[in-house]
């Protein structure tokens, strides 16, 4: 890392104009990934804000209380929360350099993710069948935009996870793969946090009268 | 023609004030042999004023990213995707979207992304420049 450059205030001494050693910031990827996550956070912030504004504009159509099946959503929430825990286990195994158990926990995480997506797709399909598609009202447009965007994120997370499983199987737990697993870990937990918001503001508060 | 006679070799023909004028023209692949330390907004003017001496030895290998075509390829497919979306050609939109994902994933399988410019190469390039500067002066 960089040493502190000598200050010219020291006197006649010539100031340091260049660094004599290799100069690369540590953990540059983590910083970049945090910046990405925060920009993603802004996308969800706008979608939540939209939902907050138009979420009760039913256009004489069905409301959240009419549509949402809280039991189903509870199961879905459980799937996603458990997937975060199993990802945590995968990271613990990664720290111990155990390729096989890391892969097993990643696989379980992916299955939870797929289960979440399956339930969400079932829910969407069911809503559209009932005539409660995104065109029905401002409430449903905002609902599908917000929950659909989260679902798309989970979809890409699962694709990413499968890709990483192949790479870990191929190259082992080398530094590059550990960095990638760490990034996906932050992404996965981030989606979990967003889902807590969706669950609370859309489903729980939506079923209130 | 005086084209060759009049060509600038210093990289700083107009007494520039900022760091891009401190390197050669065209610059070497690594831009700066050592990472500059900035004390002033007009760093290069400050350096010249306070007796900056160009380093001529003690070079170290320079860590560099390798070239990759991934960005250019993905943006080219993005053009196709944009075209397909504008004109409602859904099969092409789906195909180009899949292609973007496929190229992105394929790119992540490339682990060999960096290299070092050896110190000897840096020395050669910098010695060349030292010679040119001496001739100019």
Image (tube, rainbow, N blue to C red):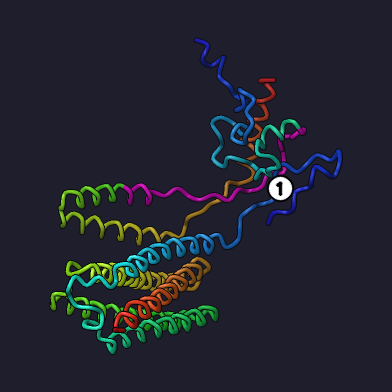
Residue A60 shows up from this direction:
yes
The furthest residue to the right: A11
Image coordinates of residue B126 in percent, x first then y, are 64, 35
Residue B132 vs residue A55, the one in the foreground: A55
Q: How many marks?
A: 1
In the picture shown, does residue B40 fall above or below A156? above
Residue A169 shows up from this direction:
no
Image coordinates of residue A130 in percent, x first then y, are 13, 78
State the predominant SS element of the stretch in magenta: loop
Quadrant containing the N terminus of chain A is: bottom right
> Residue A80's image quarter?
bottom left
Magenta span includes B57: yes
Which stretch did the figure color magenta? B50-75
Q: Residue at x 27, y 71 (%)?
A: A143
Residue A67 vs residue B95, the one in the foreground: A67
Label 1, secondary structure: give it. Answer: loop
Residue A3 vs residue A124, the one in the foreground: A124
Q: Residue at x 35, y 84 (%)?
A: A77
Query: Which of the chains bears the disc numbered 1?
Result: A
Badge 1 density bin: few <14, some 14–19, many ≥20, Cα 10 Å: some
Q: Residue at x 66, y 20 (%)?
A: B136
In the picture shown, does residue A115 fall above or below B117? below
Q: Residue at x 35, y 85 (%)?
A: A79
Which residue does the numbered mark 1 point to in the structure image?
A20
Quadrant containing the C terminus of chain A is: bottom left
Image coordinates of residue B65 in percent, x first then y, are 51, 50
Magenta span includes B86: no
> Residue A128's image quarter?
bottom left
The furthest residue to the top: B1
């Amino acid at each position: 890392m960089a040493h502190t450059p000598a200050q010219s205030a020291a006197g006649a001494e010539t100031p340091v104009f260049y660094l004599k050693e290799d100069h690369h910031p540590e953990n540059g990827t983590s910083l970049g990934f945090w910046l990405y996550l925060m920009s993603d956070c802004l996308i969800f912030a706008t979608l939540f804000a939209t939902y907050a504004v138009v979420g009760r504009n039913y256009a004489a159509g069905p409301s959240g209380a009419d549509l949402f099946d809280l039991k189903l959503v509870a199961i879905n929430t459980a799937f996603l929360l458990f997937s975060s825990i199993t990802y945590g286990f995968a990271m613990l195994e990664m720290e111990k350099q155990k390729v096989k158990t890391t892969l097993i926990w990643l696989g379980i995480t992916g299955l939870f993710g797929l289960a979440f997506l399956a339930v969400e797709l079932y829910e969407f399909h069911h809503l559209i069948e009932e005539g409660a598609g995104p065109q029905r009202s401002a409430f449903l447009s905002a609902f599908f935009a917000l929950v659909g965007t989260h679902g798309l994120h989970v979809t890409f997370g699962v694709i990413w996870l499968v890709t990483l499983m192949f790479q870990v199987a191929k190259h082992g737990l080398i530094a590059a793969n550990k960095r990638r697993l760490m990034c996906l870990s932050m992404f996965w937990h981030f989606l979990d946090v967003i889902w807590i918001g969706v669950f609370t503001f859309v489903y729980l508060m939506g079923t209130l009268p | 023609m005086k084209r060759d006679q009049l060509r600038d070799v210093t990289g700083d023909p107009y007494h520039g004030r900022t760091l891009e004028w401190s390197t050669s023209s065209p610059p070497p692949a690594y831009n700066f042999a050592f990472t500059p330390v900035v004390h002033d907004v007009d760093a290069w003017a400050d350096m010249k004023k306070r007796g900056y001496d160009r380093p001529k030895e003690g070079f170290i290998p320079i860590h560099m990213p390798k070239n990759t075509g991934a960005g250019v390829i993905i943006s080219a497919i993005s053009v196709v995707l944009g075209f397909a979306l504008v004109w409602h050609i859904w099969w092409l939109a789906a195909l180009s979207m899949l292609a973007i994902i496929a190229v992105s994933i394929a790119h992540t399988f490339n682990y060999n992304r960096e290299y070092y410019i050896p110190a000897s190469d840096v020395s050669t390039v910098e010695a060349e420049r030292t010679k040119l500067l001496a001739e100019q002066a």
